[in-house]
Amino acid sequence: MPILEIVAPMALSPIEEALELREELLAVLKQLNRSENELGVNTGLEVDELHHLLGHGSLPGVSAPDVARAVQVLVGNGYARCLDTPEYSWERGRVVETRYTITSQGKAYLWSRLQRTARID
């Protein structure tokens, strides 16, 4: 009878972790920018909404804590801002609490990526 070997997933190297975080940061920025452009009104997105959009799009394996961490990094660096005043959202049909929007600095960063690489990854 063959012996089955159980192999634990390998931990990422610091460089791989940094690249993964960079990918998450860019994906969140792109979603915040897309949300603002599509709605025409900058109502922002909640972390759960970002997680849902990213999980069904560019980052299917992303976790909710990863998205929350990415949002906090973006806010801390001035690329996104937090809107925490509760307000009724007609688009959602409910009151929204804490949500996030892209800042002009975040848009400038996306624009610089576009100019440098001829695309936004």
Image (tube, rainbow, N blue to C red):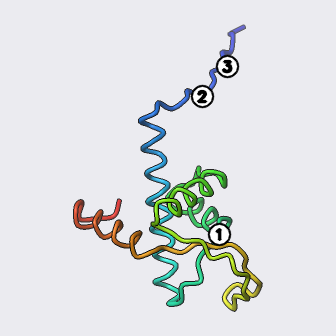
Is the N terminus in the top left, top right, bottom left or bottom right quadrant?
A: top right
Q: Dot 3: within a 10 Å radius of its alpha carbon, few (fewer than 14), some, or many (20 or more) residues? A: few
Task: Give me the disc on residue 6.
Answer: 3
Task: Give me the disc on residue 49.
Answer: 1
Q: Amino acid at mark 3?
A: Ile
Q: In front of the other: label 3 or label 2? A: 2
Q: Tell whether 30 sits left or right of 71.
A: left
Label 2: which secondary element: loop
State the CA–CA distance, disc 3 to disc 2: 10 Å
Position of residue 73 measured from the top left corner of the image (x, y, whole percent): 52, 56
Q: Residue furthest top?
A: 1
- Quarter residue 110 falls in: bottom left
Label located before the other in sequence (1 or 3) = 3
Residue highlighted by disc 2: 9
> Could you tell me which residue is drawn at 50 percent across and 61 percent down?
74
Nearest the camera: 73 or 4? 73
Q: Are marks 2 and 1 in contact (CB under 8 Å)?
A: no
Q: Amino acid at mark 2?
A: Pro
Q: In front of the other: label 1 or label 3? A: 1
Q: Amino acid at mark 1?
A: Glu
Nearest the camera: 31 or 111? 111
